[in-house]
């Protein structure tokens, strides 16, 4: 049984509590706006907290915006929006300064390298990751996301203009088209389920920001936390926002392979410090990446992940290995304290042993289509961070560009809202409260767990690193069936957070499959063995999924 809550009004409703959402919240609150942030679990349950690598940003004289732009475009395999890349890269230093002002501490050289002279010791230590031609990744040891989120949550909690609800999940956006109103589709807020009281609130907001992160839980193996079920993307789709580039799902090459590791990430920064990928072949540990790319183990992620996949299939091994034993235990502990400890607890001493790793789903490059301000084209509605597709990542995201995009678009969307002539107001519209209709409590929770597992398994097997036409068609048949079943279940039974997540997960999975089927080439992260590979910017076209009154238009 679901209760209907009172109507709540606010200037900004921010759905999601990662780095992008909280940056937006602070920016809006500093302008004197009333902000409500909702988080479906705890405020720290988001992908940001797991970010190890850091924030790529040009802060040194020997680096340049041009070089960062060029690296981003190269990784993006011809599909990036060049103007979006330039704009986001250029805003990076300003936004990093905001973080420093709020209290975020980045590692300095003296903390990592004990031999560095006194003058250089206080310079920021810059990490290197795949596809970057310079050291430009600001980090806080190997727990950058945790440092960032701890500071942002603290600042939000102490801000008098910010209200924070945990255990509150977005059910659906309230948009004029779904209310049957004439005129341009506009967003008035969202229905929010407070799981603790089983109450659905009608939250009316001048501006709604989707900041729910990505959708890694669509895959069996992922580095993402359990909350990554594509909620913002699915809600955006149901509200008639355009969804683009969903076939470009990034698989991180180096996830710890250990029964007690639970998808623990071994940061790309480990390879940035010289770790080499090796495979056990005929009883010998051999490096293999040079065979696939001139940058070896530090090649862009799509190439490394595919190479690992190929080596695993060729040798029949269950994992490949990372070798960083050329560094002392002392150095590894200072540079990667968290990773060192985790491995050590599992019996792997990084200074002496090789680390078993496999690829896992990591980042959704597609999402709700927006400009660099996070604007969706629907007045009142923004999407930021991993939920959005700004054009920065193209067909493959450059390492550590995601936190950069999150902090830049988080601020940009608030600036845009203040200069936008299209601000909408719900005060003249009769917005109905949530109506549960004839729904009754479900007596078969097993349907949810079973369907969830089935989706993740076939997505991994058929829509993963290596795709073929046949596999994609097989996945399409399965996802259609499940989507219909889940929709029926959704309307017949009382909604719960689990059911909302499942409905979103099947929806984003179908979008990934549809976009993959539609692409008539292999490009970047989308590799289809039946299609030619292209990186040509001239022929690069974004794939788009557009909902109409009559179904899905592609
Ligand atoms: C990593 O530390 O390898 C992850 C960084 C990222 O995904 O950008």
Image: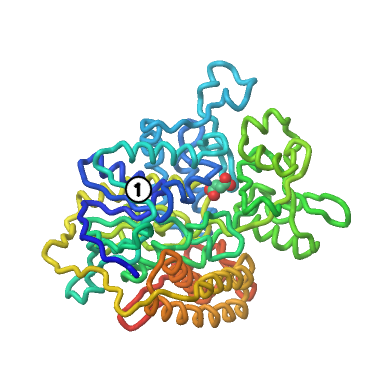
The image shows residue 72, relative to residue 204, as above or below, that is above
Q: Is residue 505 visible?
A: yes
Q: Position of residue 459 (x, y in %)?
A: 58, 70
Q: Quadrant of the N terminus?
A: bottom left
Q: Give me the residue at 26% from left, 74% from top.
A: 178
The image shows residue 243, relative to residue 143, as above or below, that is below
- Residue 492: which quarter of the image? bottom left
Q: Give me the residue at 38% from left, 73% from top.
A: 494
Q: Position of residue 174 (x, y in %)?
A: 26, 66
Q: Give me the residue at 45% from left, 82% from top.
A: 484
The image shows residue 515, relative to residue 54, as above or below, that is below
Residue lying at the far right in this picture: please name it: 283
Q: Give me the residue at 31% from left, 61% from top.
A: 192
Q: Is mark 1 within 8 Å of ligand 1?
A: no
Residue lying at the far left in this picture: please name it: 428
Residue lying at the far top in this picture: please name it: 118
- Residue 203: which quarter of the image? bottom left
Along the line of sight, the residue nearer the viewer: 237 or 453: 453
Q: Quadrant of the C terminus?
A: bottom left
The image shows residue 263, relative to residue 244, as above or below, that is above
Q: Position of residue 550 (x, y in %)?
A: 33, 83
Along the line of sight, the residue nearer the viewer: 336 or 501: 501
**Taking 192 as reference, is 313 left or right?**
right
Q: Is residue 532 visible?
A: no
Q: How is the image coloured?
A: rainbow
- State the residue position of label 1: 410
- Residue 180: which quarter of the image? bottom left
């Amino acid at each position: 049984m679901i209760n209907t809550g009172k109507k709540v009004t606010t200037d900004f409703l921010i759905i999601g509590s990662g780095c992008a959402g909280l940056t937006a919240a602070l920016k809006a609150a500093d302008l004197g706006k009333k902000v409500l942030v909702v988080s479906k679990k705890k405020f720290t349950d988001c992908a940001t907290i797991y970010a190890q690598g850091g924030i790529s940003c040009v802060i040194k004289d020997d680096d340049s915006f041009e070089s960062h732009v060029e690296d981003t475009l190269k990784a993006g395999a011809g599909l990036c929006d060049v103007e979006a890349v330039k704009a986001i890269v250029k805003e990076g230093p300003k936004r990093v300064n905001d973080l420093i002002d709020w209290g975020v501490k980045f590692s300095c050289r003296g903390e990592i390298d004990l031999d560095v002279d006194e003058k250089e010791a206080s310079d920021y230590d810059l990490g290197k990751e795949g596809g970057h031609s310079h050291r430009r990744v600001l980090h806080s040891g190997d727990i950058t996301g945790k440092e960032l989120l701890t500071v942002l949550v603290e600042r939000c909690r102490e801000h008098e203009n910010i209200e924070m609800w945990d255990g509150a999940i977005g059910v659906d956006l309230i948009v004029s088209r779904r209310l049957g109103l004439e005129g341009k589709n506009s967003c008035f807020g969202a229905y929010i389920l407070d799981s603790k009281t089983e109450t659905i609130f009608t939250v009316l907001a001048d501006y709604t920001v989707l900041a729910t992160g990505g959708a890694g839980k669509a895959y069996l193996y992922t580095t993402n936390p359990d909350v990554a079920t594509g909620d913002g993307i699915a809600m955006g789709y149901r509200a008639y926002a355009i969804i683009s580039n969903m076939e470009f799902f990034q698989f991180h090459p180096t996830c710890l392979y250990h029964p007690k590791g639970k998808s623990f990430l071994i940061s790309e920064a480990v390879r940035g410090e010289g770790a080499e990928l090796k495979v056990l072949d005929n009883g010998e540990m051999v490096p293999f990446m040079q065979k696939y790319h001139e940058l070896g183990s530090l090649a862009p992620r799509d190439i490394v992940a595919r190479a690992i996949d190929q080596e695993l299939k060729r040798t029949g091994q269950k994992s490949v290995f990372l070798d960083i034993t050329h560094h002392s235990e002392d150095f590894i502990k200072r540079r990667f304290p968290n990773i060192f400890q985790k491995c050590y607890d599992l019996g792997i001493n990084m200074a002496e042993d090789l680390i078993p790793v496999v690829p896992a789903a990591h980042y959704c490059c597609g999402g709700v289509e927006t400009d660099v301000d996070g604007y969706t084209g629907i007045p009142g509605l923004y999407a930021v961070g991993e939920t959005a597709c700004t054009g920065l990542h193209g067909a493959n995201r450059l390492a550590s560009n995601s936190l950069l995009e999150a902090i830049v678009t988080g601020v940009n969307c608030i600036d845009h809202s203040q200069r936008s002539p299209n601000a909408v107001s719900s005060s003249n519209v009769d917005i109905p409260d949530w109506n549960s209709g004839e729904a009754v409590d479900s007596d078969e929770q097993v349907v949810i767990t079973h369907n969830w597992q089935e989706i993740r398994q076939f997505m991994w097997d058929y829509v993963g690193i290596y795709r073929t036409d046949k596999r994609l068609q097989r996945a399409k048949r399965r996802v259609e069936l499940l989507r219909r079943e889940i929709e029926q279940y959704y309307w017949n039974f009382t909604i719960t957070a689990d059911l909302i997540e499942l409905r979103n997960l099947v929806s984003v999975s179908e979008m990934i499959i549809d976009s993959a089927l539609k692409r008539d080439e292999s490009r970047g992260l989308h590799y289809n063995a039946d299609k030619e590979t292209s990186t040509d910017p001239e022929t690069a076209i974004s794939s788009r999924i557009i909902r109409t009154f009559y179904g899905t238009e592609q």
